[in-house]
Image (cartoon, coloured by chain):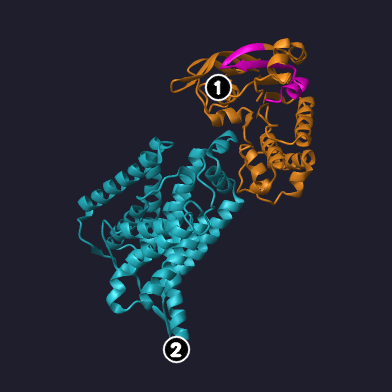
Chain colours: A orange, B cyan
Amino acid sequence: MLKLRGVEVGYGHIRALHDVSLEVNDGELVALLGANGAGKSSTLMTISGIVRPRGGTVFYDDLDLSKASPLDIVNRGIIHCPEGRRIFGGLTVQENLRMGAIRRRDRSRAAADMDRVFSLFPVLGERRRQAGATLSGGEQQMLAIGRALMAEPRLLLLDEPSLGLAPLVVRAIFRVIRELRSRRVTILLVEQNVRQALAVADRAYVLETGRVVLSGTGAELRANTEIEKAYLSGSPRKAT
Amino acid sequence: MTAFELLVQQLINAVSIGSLYALMAIGLAMVFSILRLINFAHGDLIMVGSYVALLLLLLGLPFLVAAAAGVAASTLAGLLMERVAYRPVRGAHEVAMLLTSFSVTIFLENLAIIIFRPTSRAFASPEFLRGIIEIGRLRIASLDIMAIACAAVLLAALTLYVTRTDTGIAMRAASQDLLAARLMGINVNRVIAAAFAIGSFMAGVVGILWSVRVGKIDPLMGFNPVLKAFVASVIGGLGSLSGAVIGGYVLGFLEILLQGLLPAALTPYRDALVFAVLIALLLFRPNGILGSTEREKI
C-alpha cells in the first residue's frame, strides 16, 4: 500500500506540493485530478524517487520512498509511465519493451509478457522492428504503457496517458486501463480527462495549487457540483 | 607506380589513419551522447596507456603484454576519471562539465610531466609492426593493416554490444532520454561507467598504435588525437556513434587527400585547411553529417 503523509515538495523558491496526503490500496485504481501546475506530476515524481520531498513521508509498505533510490523503487515494483510518453525514439518497439523488463531476471516470462503486450496492442506487434520515433502519437502512448507493463508493476503510475490523443485512441487506452484494473494491477492515474478517469477510478483526489482539495470515490466525485463546475461543464477554467 | 596503385596506396593510408580517428571519436561520442559532456581529457587516456606500456617494455616484458597492460591502464584511468571527476558534476551545466574536463586534462598532463619529464621518449615498435608487405608494387605497412584490423574488430564488437546486450541497448536508451531510462530501472551509473570503459579501452588501443606510428611519446601526446577526434565527431554529428565513425574516416580521407594534392610549400598548413573544410561543412550542415536538423531538446 502506498501512503503519502503531509508531503511538501519545492523547486527553488517555488512550492509545488503543500501538505499532500493520499493513499492507494492494493488492487485499487486511484485517479489524481487537477489543472496544469496543480502538482500531479510532482506527486508521481516524488513517489518514483526522482524528486525528493522537503517534508512529510512517502511509504510503500515498509519502504521509505523519500530515501530510496529510483532504482530501488523500480525494484519494488513501482513503475512510472511518464507524461509525454518519453519512449526511446531511436530504439525499436521491441528494444523499448526489452528496456521495460531490464530489471527482471525471468527471461522466459518476460518473453511471454512481450507477447501479452502485443496481444493487448496488436499494432505494436506489427511494428516490432520499427524505431519508436516512427510511431504515431497514440502508438507511442501504447508503447509507453507496454514498456511499463514489461516491468511487471505492482503499482503503476500513469501520467496523462490520454493527453493529446484522438478520441478513438483515448477509448483504446482506457479500455486497457480497465483491463489492467480487472487484473488487479494497482494504478495511480493522473488525468486531465476527468469524466473518463472518474468512470474507471475506485477513488480520486483533486489537487489545486499543490494541495488536495477534494477526495472521494469515483461516484461521489462525479456527483460533486464543484467538480462539475470546475472540470466538466465547459466553464472558463481550463480542465487540462 | 601507376596512378591506380598510388590511389590504392593512399586509400590504405587514409583508412588506417581514419580508423584511429574513428576509434577515438567513438569514446567522445559515447560519453557526450549520455552526459552532454565533451571529455577533452579523453586524449590523455592515450598518454596514460602509452606510458604504462613503455614502462613495461623498458622492464623487458614482451610487446603484446605491455600493450595489453597499457590498454588496461587506459580503461582504468577512464573509469577513475568518471568516478572522481565527472560523477560529482553530473547534471550540472554543460559549461561546468566542460571546464571539469579541462581541469582533468591539465592535472593529468602536468602529473605526467612531473613523473616522466616533459621531453619525449622513444617508443620502440616490435618487429611484426615494423614490416612492410609488398603486393606487386604496392607497399603496405603492417602497422596500417593492424590499425584497420583493430578498428574492424572493435567496431563489429561495439555494434553487437549496442544492439544485442541489455547494457548496450540501455546505453542507447539513456542517451535518448535519461529520465525515462531511470524510471525504467536502468542502472544509469553502470551504463555511464560502461560507456567510459569502452571509450577508454578504444583510446588505449589507439594509444599503442599511435605510439608505434609516431615512434615516440610525450606527456602532451593526447592533445592532437583528441582534437582530431573532436573534429571527427563534429563532422559526423556530435553524440552519434555511427556519425563518429563516419567522421573519423572522412577526416582521414580529407587529410590524406590534402597531403597528396597540396604543393609541398603548403603542406604545413594541412591541419588549417582541414579545419577550414570543417567550418564550411558546419555552415551547411550545422549538426554534422548524421545529425538531425531538429533543434536542441529543451
Residue where numbered disc 2 is placed = B2
- Assess disc 2: are there few (<14), some (14-19) or many (≥20) residues with their C-alpha within 10 Å of its C-alpha: few
Mark 1: which amino acid? Leu
Secondary structure of residue under mark 2: loop
Q: Is residue A213 magenta?
A: yes
Specify the farthest residue to the front. A236
Residue placed at 35% from the left, 50% from the top? B41
Please tell me in which quadrant of the rendered image residue B91 appears: top left
Please tell me in which quadrant of the rendered image residue B146 appears: bottom left
Nearest the eye: B65 or B27: B27
Find the magenta span and give its range: A192-214
Residue placed at 40% from the left, 41% from the top? B94
Q: Is residue B288 left or right of residue A41?
A: left
Q: Please, which chain is the residue tagged with disc 2 on?
A: B
Against B250, residue A8 (above or below) is: above
Residue where numbered disc 1 is placed = A65
Mark 2: which amino acid? Thr
Nearest the eye: A2 or B70: A2
- Assess disc 1: are there few (<14), some (14-19) or many (≥20) residues with their C-alpha within 10 Å of its C-alpha: many
Mark 1, mark 2: which one is toward the viewer? 2
